[in-house]
Amino acid sequence: MDYRVLALDLDGTLTNSKKIITEKTKTAVEKAIEKGVSIVLASGRPVLGIRKLADELGLSELGGYILAYNGGHIIDCKTKKDIVRQTVPKEYFHEICECARIFGVSALTYDTHGVVTECADASYVIKEAYNNTIPIRQVESLESFVDYDVTKFMIVGEANELKAALKYLQDKFEKKLSVFLSEPYFMEIGPLGVEKASALAKLLEHLETDREHLMACGDGLNDIPMLKYAGFAVAMENAYPETKAVADFITFSNEEDGVAYAINRFILGLEE
């Protein structure tokens, strides 16, 4: 199949456990670009947490796209122009933050520097900052501090603690917001209808191509819609069982350059 667009999740997929893109994987991505494939870095991360990796891959010069916040914000790396930008209505900020307090978990969002939260020392807040290699800002009241447009909130905590909060918010904001888990300990809260598949549909329309020409690689729960949507779906060996179940192919893990293997085999036509 002639794959013209390659959507790559970042954490657990393109990057290894040290949050690094290996030279082998970089080389495979570069060869895909040389073949005319459009690279899309499709992540729940904020733009701030994706831009460095986009720069490492040379997407500002070679072309490519950042699909941040699970698709709430899509940027053309070469022109720096927004293709899509959606935000959470400000009237919901208080209820989101209050839910975290009620259920004893931690709410966070982002500013231009990094993570913003009332719980800077919470372990899963620290994990989110580590995933993005960005700092954490402690604030007294999150909803009072955030007087700017927000594309995504997160509520983070132990999996058993998040379950009740997830149901509460899904019931509260049905047909108002998208509320789902990307990991058992990470809840994503964004504009209604925002997830990787719907965002990729908009991007493909912009690129005047269709889903049959889209190959996608992922490992997380939030990658499931993307993998179901793609013409060819690749799950990492380290992916969740639910994610593997919707894939057309299981590649090696993110510690074993699984993305490079998939590119070499299905886009470049090479056998390793």
Image (tube, helix red, strand yellow):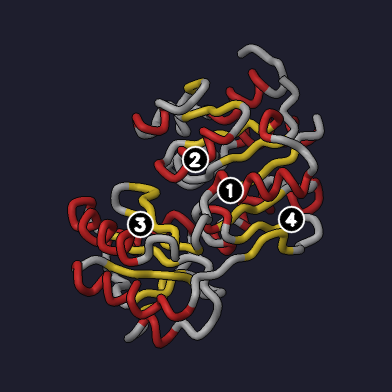
Q: Residue at x 46, y 82 (%)?
A: 146
N-term mark: 1 or 3: 3
The residue tagged 4 is 77
- Any mark on residue 198, and which? 1
N-term mark: 2 or 1: 1
- Which amino acid lies under the numbered mark 1 shown in the image of this protein? Ser
Query: Residue 210 vs residue 67: left or right?
Result: right
- Which amino acid lies under the numbered mark 4 shown in the image of this protein? Cys
Give the alpha-carbon distance from disc 2 to disc 3, as whole Å: 16 Å
- Any mark on residue 187, and which? 3
Which mark is nearer the camera, 2 or 3? 2
Which secondary structure, mark 4? loop
* Contact flag, marks 4 and 1 (Cβ < 8 Å): no
- Which amino acid lies under the numbered mark 2 shown in the image of this protein? Pro
N-term mark: 2 or 3: 3
The residue tagged 2 is 225
Mark 4 crowdedness (10 Å alpha carbons): few <14, some 14-19, many ≥20 = many
In this orientation, does residue 147 appear?
yes
Mark 2 crowdedness (10 Å alpha carbons): few <14, some 14-19, many ≥20 = some
* Contact flag, marks 3 and 4 (Cβ < 8 Å): no
Total tally of numbered discs in the picture = 4
Which secondary structure, mark 3? strand
**Farthest front residue in view:** 175
Which mark is nearer the camera, 3 or 4? 3
Q: Position of residue 79 (x, y in %)?
A: 81, 60
Which secondary structure, mark 2? helix
